[in-house]
Amino acid sequence: MVLRYDFGMRKFASFMLLSGLIFTFSLQAIAQDVVDTVVDVDIERKVGGGQREVFERAITKVSDQFIAQLIGESKLARNQSVIKNRIVRNSGKYILFIKARSPVVLGDSLRYGVNMRVSLKNLEALLLQEGLLYKADGPPKVLPLVSFSDRVNSQSYSWWAQAPSTAPVLSDLARRFNLSLRTELRNKGFFGLEPVVSEYRLQLPAALMTENPGTEDLLQLSEFYRAQVVTKGQVIISSDRVRSDVFKIDVRLSALHASNGRVIGEVIRSYSTEPGPFQQVVKAKVDEVLDKLVGDLSIQILEAWKSGTFGAALLNVAVNGDLSYQQISQFKRLLLEQVKDLKTLKERRFEPGRVLFETDSSSGAVELADSIRGKNFPRFQVSVTNVESDSVELKVTPR
């Protein structure tokens, strides 16, 4: 007997059929890394096994196989619950085709060979959403480094430089800001640190207690607290130029990769309060806009996480060779398809016989070069000619 999908099957099979039909035509057209594979599933004869059980076991087996290749055996073992409930349950997104062959009798068991077509691109996308493609375990940590300035009353507060008691109104504003940010981040699977309430400042070396830290200082702070993201910025409260009982709140926030200082999100806003007493109207305006403000920033952080560039190294890849624009485009596509360490590939400079790409790579330049050496690129002869700490030089010749 050959097991096939049938519209009369139970709920599971119906779901897989619909998913297969949809994704076979839509995803197969765009996925560039579709893999055909066969897995064996053994079912005890005395117990028996229906079509559903054969497919479930085959999907679990092939999922574990490819996930282990992407994230490693140890991380696969540590995250079995998440993989089972959030990845395998959505297998219709990366299993494009499945069909079981007639069983072979092996003693007390029946062995089914199950043909499957798997989109690694879509599997990686699911793993990214759950944060499983990254080396760090657990939710990413976000460290807020936002200073607050009250120019009306000549006060300022930065949690890493001053105790909360020095500016109680501003430190309270900082606490509320961090609480709102933590809530938004938690809803998106991130962990926001709370440095004000927990008095993180007391743990810091004196050298890092600078009121206006540069980018290098920010990255040292993130390393000190083992955070993957830094949200830096300023909230400045000043008097309106026309009315003395109206106040302006200017906000400039940005999120940075802690590993390299690249900006992954930015929010710039300016608000005016209603007329009234300073503390009352400022508090009312902050309460009104705070959730939307930090929500906009957290969405950008989430998008950077899903894009696969989180924690990746920024490298240059130079392609040298007498290539037409069409050939360059073809080679770029092949490079992204075959070299899994590459997350993006952006053209930065065109010169005669040379194109310089900028890429987000999950590995360093040496590892990236080794990965390229081990790949076969149809229609192109590729060799690595030079490797620096932040760049890889390639010689590409059309075949």
Image (cartoon, rainbow, N blue to C red):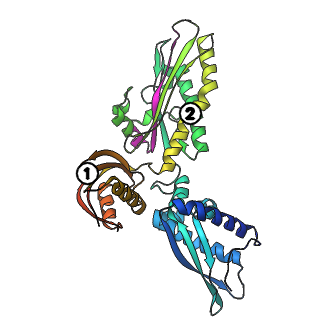
Task: Pick whichever, 232 or 62, lies toward us.
Answer: 62
How crowded pointer 1 is (Cα within 10 Å; few <14, some 14-19, many 20+) is rated as: some
Please state the horizontal and vertical placement of residue 133, each as a whole percent of the image: 48, 57
Looking at the image, residue 107 lies above or below residue 53: below
Q: Quadrant of the C terminus?
A: bottom left
Q: Position of residue 104 (x, y in %)?
A: 62, 90
Q: Considering depth in this image, is 115 or 235 the residue closer to the camera? A: 115
The CA distance from mark 2 to mark 1 is 43 Å
Q: Which residues are magenta?
A: 221-240
Q: Residue at x 34, y 57 (%)?
A: 327
**Is 365 contained in the magenta span?**
no
Quarter assignment of residue 161: top left
N-terminal of the pair, mark 2 or mark 1, is 2
Instruction: Find residue 297 and report its horizontal and vertical position in percent.
Output: 53, 36
Residue corresponding to mark 2: 294
Say which quarter of the image contains residue 261: top left
- Position of residue 271 relative to residue 337, above or below, is above
The three-letter amino acid code for the residue at tag 2 is Val
Label 1 SS = strand
Whether residue 72 is visible, yes or no, is: no
Q: Residue at x 61, y 26 (%)?
A: 289
Where residue 28 sits: x, y (%)?
Answer: 55, 63
Residue in the image at 70% along x and 81% along y: 49
Identify the secondary structure beneath mark 2. helix
Q: Is residue 260 visible?
A: yes
Question: Which label sits on residue 354?
Answer: 1
Horizontally, residue 321 falls left or right of residue 245, namely left
Q: Amino acid at mark 1?
A: Arg
Q: Residues within 10 Å of mark 2 (few under 14, many from 20)?
A: many
Residue projecting furthest to the bottom: 107
Residue that appears at 64% across and 86% down:
102
Q: Nearer the viewer, mark 2 or mark 1?
A: 1
